[in-house]
């Protein structure tokens, strides 16, 4: 006998399949708990009573589809979020990166670009930006457009500056950006060393050979099978002895691939390919 919960699960699976087949956005490997929370937010925002009605609505209403995609993709980010992580990058990882003639970094799940901007600032202040390239990828096209613009709300500047200082910033953050009445725009020279590209960790291959992969607060939204796949992608992308950075609340997931990494800065969730 089918229960209401079974029906809900089927409707949710059908919604994710619709997003994949019709709109080429693959959330099928995401944690069902995380998906349910995201869908509940979207239902409230667009004012429909259930998942079946939401399926019908997103098929004909681009704005509703955008609301759902925003709910499903990680939208919370900040410049130098978790400053201890970026201090560890500056003080412990960057000296290793400096030994390479050219530096390649992959920021996977870059969102609206704050993490990529943070890494570019560190590279600039350590004299390495000119021989570096940061691949900043995300599944969401709208987020990528915002990231490529490098423009954020002016009222975020104080928080940005505080995190920058705690992360070991060597100047004033305003040396790296222009401040206007309502916006802060980061220096175009930072984005000249970034390549923004749409990329799905669920369906696409390894992006490039890199010395550092930074993928923070993304894996926690994935189900175990997708986490395993993504960790394999990062292994394929990383050069020997390359670095992997995860979020403050993340750890290497149980996986056959996990044994290929060793802790490097354990408290900051930075690992090194063994």
Image (cartoon, rainbow, N blue to C red):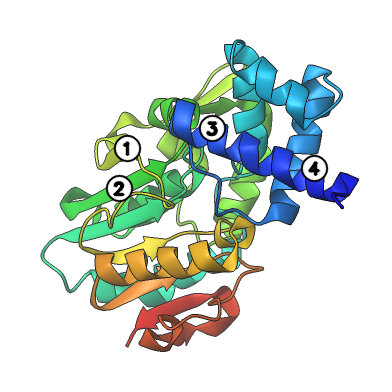
Give the mark nearest the N terminus, 1 or 4: 4
Residue 92 image-quadrant placement: bottom left
Q: Residue at x 64, y 50 (%)?
A: 162
* Relative horizontal placement of residue 63, taking residue 258 as reference (left or right): right
Camera-near label (1 vs 2) is: 1
Q: Are marks 2 and 3 in contact (CB under 8 Å)?
A: no
Q: Are marks 1 and 2 in contact (CB under 8 Å)?
A: yes
Residue 242 image-quadrant placement: bottom left
Q: Secondary structure at mark 4?
A: helix
Q: Quadrant of the C terminus?
A: bottom left
Q: Which residue is mark 3?
A: 19
Q: Residue at x 18, y 74 (%)?
A: 99
Q: Secondary structure at mark 2?
A: strand
Q: Nearer the viewer, residue 196 or 42?
A: 42
Q: Which residue is mark 4?
A: 8
Q: Nearer the viewer, residue 53 or 92?
A: 53
Image mark for residue 197: 1
Residue 198 % position (x, y): 36, 37
Image mark for residue 136: none
Q: Is residue 40 visible?
A: yes
Dot 3: few (<14), some (14–19), or many (≥20) neighbours within 10 Å?
many
Camera-near label (1 vs 3) is: 3
Give the mark nearest the N terminus, 1 or 2: 2
């Amino acid at each position: 006998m089918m229960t209401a919960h079974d029906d809900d699960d089927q409707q949710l699976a059908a919604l994710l399949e619709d997003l994949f087949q019709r709109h080429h956005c693959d959330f099928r490997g995401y944690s069902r708990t995380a998906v349910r929370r995201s869908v509940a937010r979207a239902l409230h925002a667009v004012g429909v009573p259930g998942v079946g009605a939401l399926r019908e609505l997103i098929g004909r209403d681009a704005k509703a589809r955008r609301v759902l995609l925003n709910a499903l993709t990680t939208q919370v980010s900040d410049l130098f979020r978790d400053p201890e992580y970026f201090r560890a990058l500056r003080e412990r990882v960057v000296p290793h990166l400096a030994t390479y003639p050219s530096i390649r970094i992959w920021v996977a799940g870059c969102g609206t670009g704050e993490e990529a901007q943070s890494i570019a600032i560190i590279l600039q202040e350590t004299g390495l930006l000119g021989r570096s390239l940061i691949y900043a990828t995300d599944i969401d096209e709208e987020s990528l457009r915002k990231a490529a613009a490098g423009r954020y709300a002016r009222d975020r500047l104080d928080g940005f500056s505080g995190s920058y200082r705690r992360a070991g910033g060597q100047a004033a953050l305003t040396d790296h950006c222009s401040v206007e009445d309502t916006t802060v725009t980061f220096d175009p020279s930072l984005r000249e060393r970034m390549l923004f590209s749409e990329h799905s960790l669920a369906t696409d291959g390894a992006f490039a050979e890199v010395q550092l992969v930074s993928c923070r607060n993304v894996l926690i939204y994935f189900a175990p099978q997708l986490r395993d796949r993504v960790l394999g992608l990062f292994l394929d992308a990383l050069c020997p002895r390359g670095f992997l950075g995860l979020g403050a609340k993340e750890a290497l997931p149980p996986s056959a691939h996990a044994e290929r990494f060793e802790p490097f800065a354990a408290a900051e969730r930075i690992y090194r390919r063994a």
